[in-house]
Image (cartoon, rainbow, N blue to C red):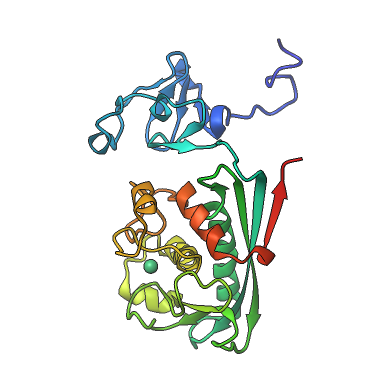
Amino acid sequence: MAGISSKAAGELENHKKFVEQELDEDIGVNLYQFKWRNLDPQIGRFIQSDPLSESYVYNSNYAYAENRVINGIDLEGLEFYQTTNIQPDGAKSIDINIKVKVVNNTAKMTKGQIKNRMEQAKVSTNETLSGVNAEGVSVNTTLDYKLVKKVDPKKDFYVSFVDETEAGTELGYTKGDIGNTSINGFEILSDQAAGIFFDSKGLDEEISNAITHEFGHGGGLYHKDSEKNPQEIKESMTPLNFMDKKAVGKPVATPQQLSQIIKSIPESRKKVVYQK
Ligand SMILES: [Zn+2]
């Protein structure tokens, strides 16, 4: 129906269609290009086998979203991602705003470089720490930062850029308690120091992701193999997760991790919207 369709004259066609994936119509292939493989919309199946199929033997190698399309979508052609659920407590959404002070404890980074890094961290924090939690409640996390000259480690929630973290050459280090969302410090390696210790490929993004990773610790999350990591969270962290050291792709927080973060934050600091 030309004129009222997305192909109407004078309109630019949006190539991102089904679940925000790009439809490739070149040479008549008509496949949705997910990050990891291509989906044929005519049969509702991927045409390549699941790169993770060895870890999920119960699942068909070509199924979309494990065939569980009632309550989820396929994330990048790699795994099922739950998008809806029952909401037992009546909450519809929860907004979390992380407010952090930022201090430059390295002589090597300019104010502009630090701002740039924090702007990237804003994006990665919003993308990584937002989603639907295990109770089916939408969580939206935003980050606000303020550059300051000095912080008080006994009072502040802060990011400190350093040339060496207390953990040595790690990109980031959480100084305070895991799950302390009020008073905590997160050391982040300066660009220059990181450039000495690590392969520079993708490092820019890795440092920003390291900030989000440390906020994850602040929100009560552990590394996958930590003894303190609760079993249900550990199981949810397969295969890609931002709390893993060797995370690849776009490893967002799992519903179980989002629930843990919400538990860590005092009620007064969350904006909860309830269903009418
Ligand atoms: Zn860590």
User: On the rendering, which quadrant does ligand 1 occupy?
Assistant: bottom left
Percent across and percent down for residue 273 are: 72, 49
Work out whether residue 254 can be spotted.
no
Q: Position of residue 191 (x, y in %)?
A: 44, 74
Residue at 38%, 28% in the rendered image: 66
- The reply to whether residue 23 is in sight is yes
Residue 168 appears in which quarter of the rendering?
bottom left
Quarter of the picture containing the N terminus is top right
Q: Position of residue 24 (x, y in %)?
A: 49, 25
Residue shown at the point (25%, 39%) measured from the top left: 55
For the point 33% across and 24% down, the residue is 62
Residue 171: x percent and y percent? 39, 72
Looking at the image, the residue that sits furthest to the top is 1
Q: Residue furthest front?
A: 88
Q: Is residue 233 above or below residue 179?
A: above
Q: Is residue 107 above or below residue 204?
A: below
For residue 198, what is the image quadrant?
bottom left
Q: In the depicted view, which residue is nearer to us: 272 or 151?
A: 272
